[in-house]
Image (cartoon, rainbow, N blue to C red):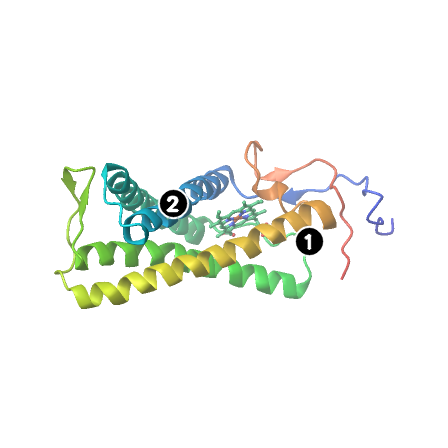
Amino acid sequence: MPNSTPSQPDSRASHIECYRPLARVFHWLTVLLLATQFPVGLYMVYRGPGQNIWDATTNTLYSGHKLVGVVIFALVVLRLSYRLIVGAPAPAPTLTRWQKVISALNHWSMYLLLVLVPVLGYLAICYFPALGIFGGVSLPAIVAPDRATYDQVIDWHAAGAGALAGLICLHVAAALYHYFIRRDDVLARMLPGLGDSRLETPARQVSSRR
Ligand code: HEM
């Protein structure tokens, strides 16, 4: 049977390998935490250093940002370990060779930054030092205070977060392109709620346009 056209979904039952349920849980938990972390980080810097408002709200925002940063780091360590041990499904069959290369580069660069950005943030609060959260608990220091190094490290933290945001935009744009324009199963492979690791519904479009 010849390839279907974009407007005529292929009626063959395709068996597209999905991400495993735990991989999908890791993915969408990361999304949820980053969706909180980016706006909180930007708003606390706007209120504190930007507007010079150092009240309870600003302190709570800083505390929340530190805590969520530690949680993101722990989650990414678990997620990366799982990824390296269990692996991931082969790239979707509708991807061209260059799309596979760009998507792998993007995924691994995001993993790298998901580790680096929280580590740099944590080092920054040790160098400042500003390890207290929610007016009581103090996070453990891993390096001695040093203001000059703080200035450098906090710039790297911000630059890393900016780069991560850029890669995420590219990644989301690609996922939406596959869903709305290519109309293939790339997004479905990562959606929550699928019981096992194979999609057995007819593909939205199986044909490959290279
Ligand atoms: C908010 C931050 C996000 C981060 C940090 C992120 C990160 C990642 C990473 C690292 C992978 C690779 C998984 C692996 O193979 O090990 C991945 C896969 C994927 N993500 Fe995201 N993601 C984010 C948001 C999103 C959103 C909003 C969507 C959908 C609109 C999405 C859709 C996908 C899909 C479909 C895959 C599987 C791609 C494939 O089959 O090759 N991601 N994501």
> In the image, 57: left or right of 90?
left
Front one among 80 and 139 = 139
Q: Position of residue 76 (x, y in %)?
A: 38, 49
Which labelled disc corresponds to residue 37?
2
Which labelled disc corresponds to residue 101?
none
Front one among 79 and 157 = 157
- Judged from the image, the secondary structure of the residue bearing numbered disc 1 is loop
- Residue depicted at 70% across the width and 54% down the height: 94
Q: Is mark 1 within 8 Å of ligand 1?
A: no
- 170 vs 47: above or below: below
Q: Are marks 1 and 2 in contact (CB under 8 Å)?
A: no
- Residue depicted at 28% across the width and 37% down the height: 57
Quadrant position of the C terminus in the picture: bottom right
**Mark 1 Cα shell of 10 Å, populated few (<14), some (14-19), many (≥20):** some
Q: Position of residue 201 (x, y in %)?
A: 71, 35
- Give the residue type at disc 1: Pro
Q: Is residue 78 visible?
A: no
- 10 vs 110: above or below: above
- Judged from the image, the secondary structure of the residue bearing numbered disc 2 is helix
Q: Which residue is mark 1?
A: 93
- Residue depicted at 59% across the width and 64% down the height: 101
- The quarter of the picture where residue 191 lies is top right
**Mark 2 Cα shell of 10 Å, populated few (<14), some (14-19), many (≥20):** many
